Amino acid sequence: MNLANWEDARDAARRRLPKIFFDFIDGAAFSETTARANIDDFEKWTLEQRVLVDVADRHLSTRYLGTGRPSPLILGPVGFAGLFAPNAEIKAARAAHNAGIPFCLSNFGIVSMEALRDATDGPLWFQLYVLKDRDLSENLLRRAQSIGVEALVITVDSQVKSVREKDTRNGFRTLTKLTPGLALKLMRKPRWVAGALMAGPIRINNLSDYPEYGTNALEQAAKLGHLIDSSMTWDDVARFRERWKGKLIIKGILSLEDAAQCARLGVDAIIVSNHGGRQLDGARSSISVLPEVVGEVGDKLDVLFDGGVRRGGHVVKAMALGAKGVLLGRSYAYAVAADGQRGVETLLELMRVEMDVAIGHIGVRNFNELFEHRDRVLRRHA
Ligand SMILES: Cc1cc2nc3c(=O)[nH]c(=O)nc-3n(C[C@H](O)[C@H](O)[C@H](O)COP(=O)(O)O)c2cc1C
């Protein structure tokens, strides 16, 4: 498959996936305004071209969580990704690790963390929601520790279950089993069906000891939203900081006060994120919040970023505004649905080239120089 950019991956994913699953990736909360703003607001900054600067010796490395990285890209947590292609998480993680970047398994990923660890050997992160079931949380933490994950990512922006209207129409999160109507719709995508039949039953394998939360992915999707603890507070973050000896990342920060509180609690990194606009419709775009958060806590912890990142140029803008690393969500979900491991590898390579072209044309050789010269290389428009 000849993908030239993320939109090709999205088109191919749309052709290959049953609508219920494509819409699950593509959709966002209510009117989807925040999801659109995440992408559109990158255009509020333009890159300033400079010529005749020696940029022969360029690289795209960065540093966060105390470790040098060959690229700022990270594959972020995407729940139910194993629905998009057989063993999608393993395929995406292998692509990430071939590029030397971390892969973060979602709390609601399909593959078990042990199977993922056995399948690939690069940096793995595990994302956890604050769950009402403390026994389940503890079980997941213990396992994450025993497979040696590099970082625990706690997502804090999903305290209240939001609504994605595309999912409502399709019945994703209400259907608990394969109905004749759904079977007919799935059959319109025979390649997907063939892959799913060969892969066997699809369910969240990290939860296989907890049948009360469902025994197949559809039933689990319907039940798990209610598992997230709406009563969570900063005490829970303090408790996780105490309990988890490794690197701790808080995902879903959009305000200066919350960022400052993370720094006070000794969190190693935060992810400026609005969950791809899938939670609070009407929230500010991630990129518009990023510079303020970096100004507030950038010297106290690592600020990572996601939301609307589709192009290498987006990554360059986020890095110029002070991010240390950038997570991909939908773009790699489309790519793995489109063409498995090869799809994600292609996307990562396309984005590498896009980043390299962007930094070269603005006359910097690396992300340190980019940040140093941020006032010259980025221009903000109203
Ligand atoms: C299909 C899908 C499932 C997601 N599942 C999770 C999840 O389980 N945990 C989580 O913290 N974030 C989840 N996210 C949010 C992503 O980690 C990320 O914040 C978001 O996708 C970034 O925006 P972008 O898709 O515009 O790049 C999900 C996103 C998508 C598209």
Image: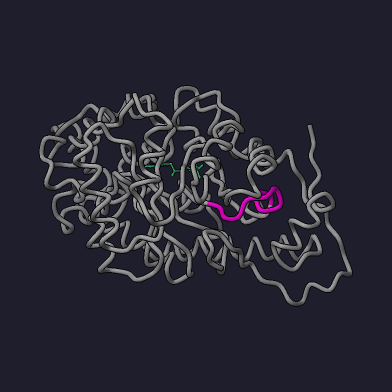
Q: Residue at x 56, y 68 (%)?
A: 68
Q: In front here: 280 or 145?
A: 145
Observer able to see residue 307: no
| Residue 126 place in picture, x, y as percent | 35, 52
Tell whether position 312 is magenta.
no
Tell whether position 318 is magenta.
yes
| Residue 365 place in picture, x, y as percent | 74, 68
Above or below, comparing residue 51 to residue 151 in the picture: below
Instruction: State the residue lying farthest toward the bottom.
Output: 57
Q: The C terminus lies in which quarter of the figure? A: top right
Above or below, comparing residue 56 to residue 183 in the picture: below
Q: Horizontal placement of 322 versus 72: left or right?
A: right
Q: Horizontal placement of 303 versus 373: left or right?
A: left
Range of magenta residues: 317-326
Q: Residue at x 49, y 41 (%)?
A: 265
Q: Horizontal placement of 202 versus 350: left or right?
A: left
Q: Residue at x 30, y 45 (%)?
A: 107
Above or below, comparing residue 35 to residue 90 in the picture: above
